[in-house]
Image: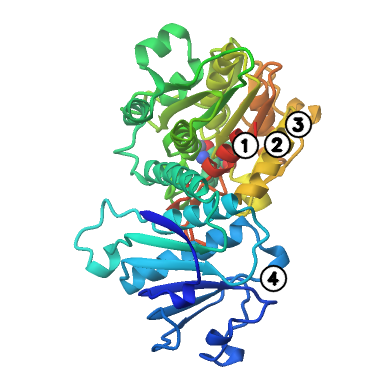
Amino acid sequence: MEIKVEEGDILTTPSELAVLGCFEDAPLPAAVAALLEPADFSGKAGQTLLLYPRGAVAPKRLLLVGLGKREKASAETIRRESATAVKEAQKLMVEAVTIGVHGDLSLEPEAAAQAFAEGIELGAYRYQRYQTGLDASKSFEVKKSTVFTKTGARTAAGVNAGQAIARGVNFARDLVNGPGYAMHPPQLGEEALALGKRVGLKVTVFDMAQLTEQGFGGILAVGKGSEHEPRFIIMEYGQAKPGTPTVCLVGKGLTFDSGGLSLKPPEAMETMKSDMGGAAAVFGAMQALAELKLPLHVVGLVSSAENMPSSNAYRPGDIIKTLSGKTIEVLNTDAEGRIILADALFYAQRYKPDAIVELATLTGAVIIALGSHATGLMSTDQALADRLSQAGETSGERVWQLPLWDEYAAMIKSQIADLKNIGGRAAGTITAGAFLAEFTGDYPFAHLDIAGTAWVDRPAKPYDTNGGTGIGVRLLIEFLRNY
Ligand code: BES
Ligand code: ZN
Ligand code: ZN
């Protein structure tokens, strides 16, 4: 979408639809206050009121959006307002929308512009590839938005960054929303190669022969039951140089998780095409960081497989030898993410990274702990954890840390192999994180469990739509920009 930033007054500029954000604790502009009953709009966060001013102000339609208390306002407030704006424009079938905030924002102009752009592009997203016969109102596209600010300066860079980040998020959403039969591991490999061509990454995809030859025992075991072969994907941006940090981003790419022989019940399986949310975040972040030309060396690693039951599937009781040489006793074939990630995390060590950040829809337990409002964070390095927590606050993709004490690692020791792939019901999210940390050597490692945040059935935020959220992209880019 075309996004412009203008200095000026949204209420004296003619437009089809003007969206004005208003604080709860600041009076409305007099010209607006005259148009409504005071009791009908308080400015509470999320409240909206559509007005038809009939010439009282220049815009033909005026949507008031509550921003809540001014001191609580953040980039997230703006993101939500602008997503609300673009959704209303879609509904009213208005091609161009103007957006502004009444009163002062305590945000840097560049950060505000970025948040406006993110909200607009994320709010406009719909996944309609498989819908036929959509009527005009459902598929209407908003073409242009104009953001009104008091200072035009330094906003163009913010808009560009916001758009690049949102493109990354929407790309991740597309990957997750693709049905399992279409977005299978070889297809994900093709997507990586196409991405590499598009934005300039060195991409390598290991097929069965290479996985076998090099000993990716975890990925091979999990992928055995499916007719779609597993893949390991390497995407490299920039190069290792003294003075340039190297960061490895690792993603779980289970294109469909049936549970395998430890089969999931039907309801639990409904959304399991989204078990590649971690991989999608890595893809989206690699795209965005290349577009933003960040001065870093970043290696994206994705383990991809489909977890299916079949006579050839791996079984409970099997013992797997991973790429690292460590062995895993399989007790539940539904705890497959940690097994394919074991190979990827061990592989990451060859880059001698300054940090390994891995994302996975890993455990149902994290949904019990944090719901859909935060991603679970576990780390072997507190400075790295702090960077991610900070990036979570700024990007609006919050994370919450759980401990990785030795006692948890003891829960996944096996009697017969080095590790077992489940540690019992207690602390299910942490024992999974502790399992992963067995494969990262001494490199600073952070694990993000996005099982609760990668998918939404009923969106709570205006910039989300049902399905894949693209979680992780905004967080990773914020983290990398500050690195
Ligand atoms: N992909 C699931 C985790 C998941 C659950 C993601 C719900 C998104 C929504 C993962 O592979 C899994 O099945 N984990 C098991 C582990 C258990 C068997 C130790 C779980 O959480 O139940
Ligand atoms: Zn599973
Ligand atoms: Zn899974």
> Which residue in the structure is indicated by mark 3?
383
Looking at the rendered structure, the secondary structure element under dot 3 is helix
Q: Pinpoint residue 243: horizontal percent, then vertical percent.
A: 64, 16
**Does 464 sit above or below residue 268?**
below
Mark 2 is surrounded, within 10 Å at the Cα level, by few (under 14), some (14 to 19) or many (20 or more) other residues, namely some
Callout 1: SS: helix
In this rendering, which labeled residue sits more in front, label 4 or label 2? 4
User: What residue is rendered at 30% in x and 38% in y?
Assistant: 181
Question: Which amino acid is tagged 1?
Answer: Phe
Residue 226 percent coordinates (x, y): 35, 28
Check if mark 3's residue and mark 2's residue have beta carbons within 8 Å: yes
Looking at the rendered structure, the number of numbered marks drawn on it comes to: 4
The numbered mark, 2 or 1, whose residue comes first in the sequence reads 2
Residue 356 higher or lower than 7, as above or below: above
Q: Quadrant of the C terminus?
A: top right
For the residue pair 64 and 125, the one nearer the viewer reads as 64
How far apart, in angstroms, are the residues tagged by discs 1 and 3? Answer: 12 Å
Residue that numbered label 4 is attached to: 69
